[in-house]
Image: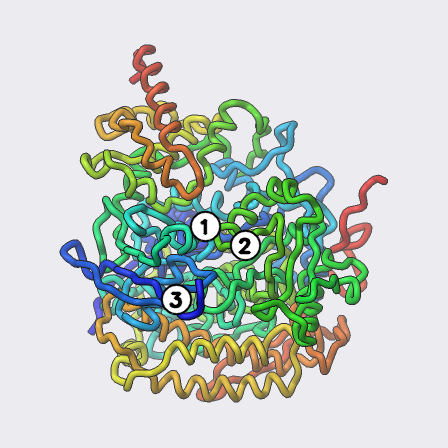
Amino acid sequence: MFKQHDTDILILGSGGAGLFAALHACQTDPDLKVTLAVKGLIGKSGCTRMVQGGYNVALLPGDSLERHFMDTIVGGKWLPNQDLAWRLCQTAVERVRELENEIGCFFDRKADGTLHGKAFAGQSFDRTVHKGDLTGIEIVNRLMEQVWARPVERLEEHRALALIPTADGAALAGVLLVDMRGGGFLFVRAKAVLLGTGGGPTMYRYHTPSGDKSMDGLAMALRLGLPLRDMEMVQFHPTGLLAGPETRMTGTVLEEGLRGAGGYLLTGEQRRFMLDYDPQGERATRDVVSRAMAAEIRKGGTTEHGGLYIQMHHLGPDKVRKAFKGMVERCADSGFDLAGGLVEVVPTAHYFMGGLICDTDTRTGLPGLFVAGEDAGGVHGANRLGGNGVANSTVFGGIAGEVMAKQVKGEAHRDPDKALIHAEIERARQPFDKPLGDLNGLRERLLDIMWDDVGVLRTAAGLKRGLERLTELEAELLQSGLADQDQVFNLTWHDWLNLRSLVEVSGAIARAAIARENSRGAHFREDFPEAGDMEGSCFTQVRRRGETIEVTEVPVEFTIVKPGESLIDGDAGAPQARPA
Amino acid sequence: MKQGDKLAVRIWKGGADGGYTEFEAPLRANQTVLDVVTWIQRNRDPGLAYRFACRVGMCGSCAMTVNGKPRWTCRTHVSKVTQDSRLTIGPLRNLPIVKDLVCDMTVFFDKWQNARGRFQGRATRYDDIERIAPDTPARKAADAGIECINCAVCYAACDVVAWKPDYLGPAALNRAWTLQNDIRDTAQAERLAAVAGDAGCHSCHSQQGCTAHCPKSLNPTAAIAGLKRSVFQAVLRGEV
């Protein structure tokens, strides 16, 4: 049983990508019916909102698109799709102006009233525009106000379950959702659909994204047989809060600026170790610090909960309190004294570079399906620069809104594969018919498998063991039922659905990580520690064919610049030279 | 606190005509109210409904009534709200209950719009970004209220909303005041008219429940007082 509903444009997700898509679709063609479906509340459940650092844009005097682009390509270890990266840098300029002038964001100014750009690791220019250290709240609050003011149909607490193509599979017909509040199923037929559910690698023991993230978008795309790229590329942030088991505080991010300002990382015995790994010490890039921390943790000598410490008090507790007010307050709310004491930290899964393959207009290989934000792959390659995540979601979300609105004009709805809708409903309802299972135990096992075998430091043996353990886990999950049979706001059912998506995507991560026999950016193989030949760089592509999941390597096309070449004078990715 | 200590937790179950159910949960050194709710859902009552997302005080999804007061549960350490290991957790006041701890926040967001809580500028994406000094009194007044996360804690704390359901409430009016201080905004007369009516700023009795409970330490009472002054001056000028 399901209800049916028609719209012109259906947008899944309400982070920066979804909100901008809705806005631009309305602006491009006000006569269209635009529907925004989101797992939580509009504007409250995406990760754009959680952006602390800021927005990379080549808008300030002395910067250039070429410089932003080169930083992105070098940071991504030559794996990014260069056309996507160029479109990102180019459109970010217009998007930041739009955010300020039309949407109403107010970014931090210098004393003379011009925009302030802050320094961020891996960039050769101080280009990160920001609102204090809560940039995401400013961007998403202002965007959601604009979307509320327009005739956008809101499907809040509606979770997408499956992308439904036409019976011949030639194009997308719509999306099957579950109304979480009412408990019923809803099929929304749409002429164009944007996948903007966001990534969020929450299958790792320690993770930073919003607690409701479950990678449904990529799981749905994988199930439909669409090609995903760079699936091995999971960015780890070095300083996740470690507060022990059974608290949602564990894994949440303590900002990058703490290390930048001179914070120390210490072992359980309070010994500084970062200088053993890198001459930049704690100020080395995220990937280097995360790997050093993982190596130290493996050696033993850890803190009470198995991590390391961050120490700030040598910089002066009062100064720390002033410079990092938000972080100090958050730690205090959790019971920790960041300014004066030691806080336990651990590397934590932060961002997912991999995603669905698309072109610069956000089109995927399936007509009718568009993708933007963390669900899309190729912009960041092997590593994302801090400040390029919110640029990615807002730039391509806006583009998707315009492109979809132009495309659907005069198009008719397509009829769905009805049998598939029924099969997907059965699939979602599966745990209601099974004997009660131990979802908590399964969740804990998934977190451990991914952390231990598919984590910061990888080997062929570990990855293969991880994949085997994932296969066993999936089989058990499929036999695990629920105690509560009500479909209305049944969070435990949604926990089951979350786990199912996460297990499916985890398998793709492990397979891609096995295939990449070198170490690039966020992906580190202890058995293949070299980066490999840059000119011959390939990206991995994962897709389901029938019952098997196939991984291929696809050569990177250097459409704008080749390894060894540069569009700028000076070093890309290097900190800006400062007068002595 | 020692190993094995327990919390006695009462949680609202059902809709408006529901009631409290008692649970026992382990007391831990590092534990927020959201963690307690999560533990009960995962271990005792799989049907328990609650809403959360970011878990770090950014999204404003998880506010509930905790021992009689509205709070953001992801950033409320258990030790802060109970000395005797007892917790009573219910949905927010002044909003319709969907199920258990989940409220329907639609009316809260609608009022934000009714207070014209959105920016309207004259420049476009093709124009340069305006040069604006960060330290003018107007900009400082705008900045003072801008970090609201729309969690509805103030709305639930407000007695005027309880007595007068049409009242726009502290969050919407706070947003309106930040916009009245934004020199880029071009809808200030319309906004002032929107908040000058019966359901607007003059309904506020300055009881400061909003300010006392705001988890971000904002001061909506001061913002509403600012709106009252602006409306008064506009009336004197014959503009409202």
- Point 38% across, 59% down: residue: B34
Secondary structure beneath dot 3 equals loop
Q: Are marks 2 and 1 on the same chain?
A: no
- Kind of residue at disc 3: Asp
Label 1 environment density (alpha carbons within 10 Å; few <14, some 14–19, many ≥20): many
Q: Estimate the x, y position of residue B167 in percent, counting from the top left.
A: 24, 34
| Parent chain of label 3 | B
Q: How far is mark 3 from mark 1, CA to CA?
A: 31 Å
Residue bearing mark 1: B58
Q: How far is mark 3 from mark 2, CA to CA?
A: 21 Å
- Kind of residue at disc 2: Phe
Residue bearing mark 3: B5
Pick the residue in front: A452 or A559: A452
| Parent chain of label 1 | B
Label 2 environment density (alpha carbons within 10 Å; few <14, some 14–19, many ≥20): some
Residue lying furthest right: A580
Residue bearing mark 2: A336
- Tell me which corner region of the image, top left, top right, bottom left or bottom right, holds residue A484: bottom left
